Image: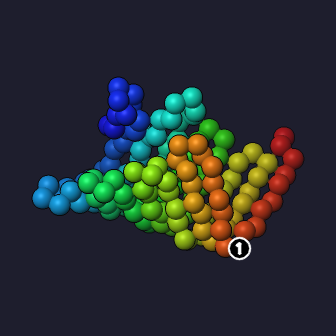
Amino acid sequence: EHFTGSRLAALGHASSATYERSSGHFTATAVAADLFRPGREKVRVEAAEVRGSLPARAADGEGGVVVKSAELTATTERARFDGQAMRASGESNVRVEAPGLRLESSGFRLDLTDGHAVFEGGVRSRVEAVR
């Protein structure tokens, strides 16, 4: 659980986790976390493995990272999460699917507070009629 003031900001679980108390570093497997943003829908982040630092509020997800909202699913092999800046980024191929949209790129930057995303490198998109 992570709170911002009295508001629940994130809630997650992992099948296993190790934590080094002296350094604040951690490793977790089969991770799923729900991010709650005021006035916006919940976002779920899943990763096969996450390594990070609690003092730095940063983590790297690997082995397949999936970000899901009510309308969108994004997948990539690895991503970096910066909890201080509330941003995620990656330099691996990313695929985004939403109703009427399919997009692929070789990198991304995502603002976790407002959902604004920038796709980098070779970007291919396909827009379809929503049925």
- x then y, percent, for residue 50: 36, 59
Q: How is the image coloured?
A: rainbow
The residue sitting at 53% across, 66% down in the picture is: 90
The residue that disc 1 covers is: 122
Give the residue furthest to the top: 6
Dividing the image into 4 quarters, which one contains the C terminus? top right
The residue sitting at 31% across, 60% down in the picture is: 52
The residue sitting at 71% across, 73% down in the picture is: 122
Give the residue furthest to the left: 22
Q: Is residue 89 above or below residue 7?
A: below
- x then y, percent, for residue 72: 64, 46
The quadrant in which residue 61 appears is: bottom left
Amino acid of disc 1: Gly
**Left or right: where does residue 60 sit relative to residue 77?**
left
Q: Is residue 59 above or below residue 41?
A: below
Q: Is residue 48 visible?
A: no
- Tag count: 1
- x then y, percent, for residue 95: 64, 61
**Left or right: where does residue 110 sit relative to residue 33?**
right
Give the residue furthest to the bottom: 122
SS at mark 1? loop
Query: Residue 93 or 114: which is nearer the viewer?
Result: 114
Dividing the image into 4 quarters, which one contains the N terminus? top left
Q: Is residue 7 visible?
A: yes
Query: Residue 43 or 115: which is nearer the viewer?
Result: 115
Mark 1 surroundings within 10 Å by alpha-carbon count, few (fewer than 14), some (14 through 19), many (20 or more): few
Query: Residue 4 or 105: which is nearer the viewer?
Result: 4
**Left or right: where does residue 68 sit relative to residue 122?**
left
Query: Residue 86 or 13: which is nearer the viewer?
Result: 86
- x then y, percent, for residue 43: 52, 41
